[in-house]
Amino acid sequence: MKPSVTLTLRDPLRQTALPYWVDVITRPQLRNERFLPAVDALFAQHHLAFIATQEYTPAGAVWSPQEVASGLDRVYRLVLQTDSRIPPQLIESIRLLPEVERVRAGVIGGMDFQPQPARAFSTHTDRASRDAIYLDEAHAFTEGDDTVTVAIMDTGVDVDHPEYRHALLPGYDFVDILNGAQDFMGDYLGADPMPEDEVGHGTHVAGIIAGTGRNMPRGVAPRCRVLPVRVLAAMSREGRPVGAGLVENINNGVKWAIDHGADVINMSLGVRHTGGGLPHTEVIDYAQRKGVTVVAASGNDGRQALYYPGAFPSVIAVGAADDRGEITEFSTFGDHVSFIAPGVDVYSSSLDDGYAFSTGTSHAAPFVTGAIALMKSYARSKGLDLGDRQVKHVLKHSSDKVDRRFKNAKAGYGRLNLGDALRYLDYKLNSGRRTSDG
């Protein structure tokens, strides 16, 4: 897809029904070249023709109350008809229009990934990271439930990998990039139902969450289902592939996952705020309204900084702990960080049915995501659904504190202790008291 402008109106269009941008890719006859007269005039001043599309599609026949409340029905994507640069003056002029709430040009974000291929495969390799969260103790309560779905927003997954193919649900690939496409490789055009990984990042995350334990330690929630959503393509950097994609397409992946039954979403990615409104705002709000827990990596720059979606108050931001359980030097920190989990030399699945070690907050986040899936599974075995606030309460009060404070600026509420989380949850459920945030 060519460069685009995403804008949110204060009120949805009433007279014109615009097509969903994904549908326009395969059905060009749906193209609409007009939007609002004031916006059309500004594009004409810059000699730019565009195709007007709806940014999201409703989950049902009409927009639901939650979708409307999150403003999803008011977001539009204007796609240029030529591969031209979007002038900053155009964005600023659109921002001044009274009908417009916010506007931004398409932004590419993503993550780095430097796996270390494993020469030997073993179920005992890197037992330390699983022992650090007391995984065996947690598995005495439950190994998951196939009614609990974990969505992975990432580079896709190796869909045939033996470690987790038992858990995979049909996913989707939202990657469609033209702006800066000379830096991309492999499949970066045409959204489709094939979320195949070309980087390895999402494959590594999937193994941590749902690995069956064939040639690696078992995943955190091996009996839960995995919904793979490819939102990042392979970009060449210094001769190796890294994950990168349009923020707007990541947003579409999040909404699609929510509408397809995700109970918890892993987002081992993050972008800085660059203007035009916070990235992911409307879909993170939608997730909260739908009761879906979102977990994100805090970042890997070792500074006090905000990366989104992890910086949103409703998102669980995860930092990385080393093999001694201490916060790593590279882990981004701040008041928004919720927990730390193993993030150094984590052993998991890799491309081509392989295995690899990798380091980063991207690989700490899925330990917490899997923990939430396990907690939701155990509650369902008792006939109950565990809500987002309840999940956060249990994790806050069962984590291992790193000092005398309840919350630490670098480690949040502490190190993930999944064994204690399941024990505390079991006590709460059996005592008949519902957990609450506090």
Image (tube, grey):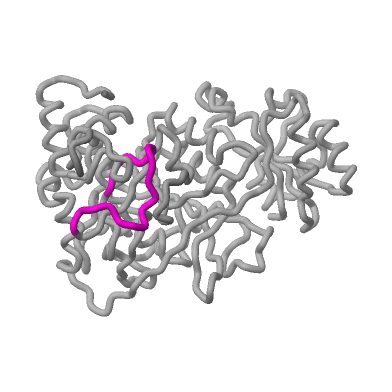
Q: Quadrant of residue 359?
A: bottom left
* Residue at 24% over, 49% down: 221
In this rendering, does residue 151 appear at all? Answer: no
* Horizontal side of residue 139 vs 119, given as left or right: left
Q: Position of residue 100 (x, y in %)?
A: 72, 29
Q: In terms of depth relative to the viewer, which is nearer, 15 or 315?
A: 315
* Horizontal side of residue 261 vs 220, given as left or right: right
Q: Verify whether residue 87 appears in magenta.
A: no
Q: In terms of depth relative to the viewer, which is nearer, 63 or 287?
A: 287
* Residue at 39% over, 50% down: 332
Q: Is residue 43 above or below residue 244?
A: above
The secondary structure making up most of the magenta span is: loop
Q: Is residue 152 above or below residue 197?
A: above
Q: Position of residue 244 (x, y in %)?
A: 54, 58
* Residue at 59% over, 27% down: 71
* Image quarter hosting the C terminus: top left
Q: Position of residue 295 (x, y in %)?
A: 37, 43
Please tell me how many numbered marks the rendered image carries.
0
> What is the span of residues highlighted in magenta in the rendered image?
324-340
Q: In terms of depth relative to the viewer, which is nearer, 176 or 260?
A: 176
* Residue at 68% over, 28% down: 101
